[in-house]
Image (spheres, rainbow, N blue to C red):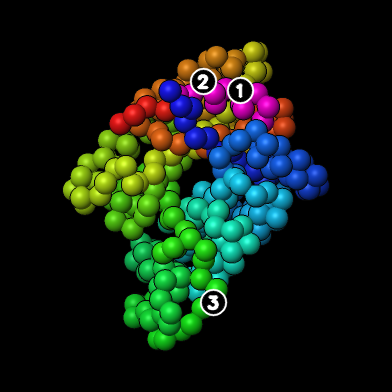
Amino acid sequence: MNSIPCGIAIPQTFTGKVDIDLIRKFVTRAEELDFDSLWVQEQIISDSAILEPVTLLTYVAALTSRARLGSSVLLTVIRNPVQLAKCLATLDQLSRGRLTVGVGIGGAHVPERVFGVSGERRARRFVEGLTAMKALWTQPRATMKGEFWQFENVPMEPKPVQRPHPPVWFGARDAIGLRRAVRHGQGWMGAGSSSSADFVEQIGMLRRFLEQEKRDPAQFAVSKRVYIAIDNDRHRAERRLQEWFGVRYRRAEMATRVSVWGSSAECSDQLNELIRAGAQHLMLNPVFDELEHLEVLAEVVKQCTAISL
């Protein structure tokens, strides 16, 4: 039986000075340890030191050669889709076709007006922006006649290496978002800030929508971001997770509901529960002692066994 493919989150949030050496050591070692992918998040407005995701992935592309590079997720409603299409096509070229584009619609916590866009008709603008990017990636001269974006015979070269375009994975929690993922994407990643129980409920909805839309489940990726802390001292692991959640999400109590923590064996058991629920891929997200976690997680994932559907 084969181990399930596992990605890992790149150190992206820092207290004080940004540690470039840590990023370099982390991503090169992660590739040596055969993690299948390296991931970033997006939070542009923050009083924490969080690096911009596309720029960070471009740096990581130059440091690696095999691991896929993913975003989970880009908030595309606050970005110009023409410019973003160009940035992502360039990143796919520079990485020789290793990009997975994770996208999300955002929510009330996203200050859209700071970015010069309205919060009204967010879903329509979100889908239309993705349609515009796909047109620019696939059409020799792209034409878009939408409510928010209109252009005609617009060339954009080079196209992405991956054809027809890099896979688009959605972040979504509710039925509307999951149905949108099935209609417009090639995969879905459950949020790290959702629990294992949430994931079970969401994957049930996802499977129904795949059947209704006549999508082949084997051609639709299912992943889960997992905030994780491995420590034989469970109380210490829990405390450190709560400290991080208190800073990142302003909700320390969330840590115990959504995270995986404890000994290597305990964490392996909890990850295998997600696999049995239907996860085909896991994106592991340590939030402290990242280099130390990297080594331990490389052993833990060997115990996470893929299940044939």
Residue 93 in picture, x, y percent from top left: 59, 64
Check disc 3 and report its element: helix, strand or loop. loop
* Mark 3 crowd level (few <14, some 14–19, many ≥20, 10 Å Cα): few
In the image, taking residue 161 as reference, residue 295 lies left or right, namely right
Work out whether mark 2 precedes mark 3 in sequence or the reverse, and give the earlier one: 3
Reading the image, the residue beneath label 3 is 157
Residue 249 in picture, x, y percent from top left: 57, 40
Reading the image, the residue beneath label 2 is 303
Provide the residue span drawn in magenta: 294-305
In the image, taking residue 187 as reference, residue 13 lies left or right, namely right
Above or below: residue 176 compared with residue 268 = below
**What's the CA distance linking mark 1 and mark 2?**
7 Å
Q: In which quadrant of the rendered image does the C terminus lie?
A: top left
Residue 172 in picture, x, y percent from top left: 39, 47
Reading the image, the residue beneath label 1 is 299
Q: Residue at x 72, y 27 (%)?
A: 292
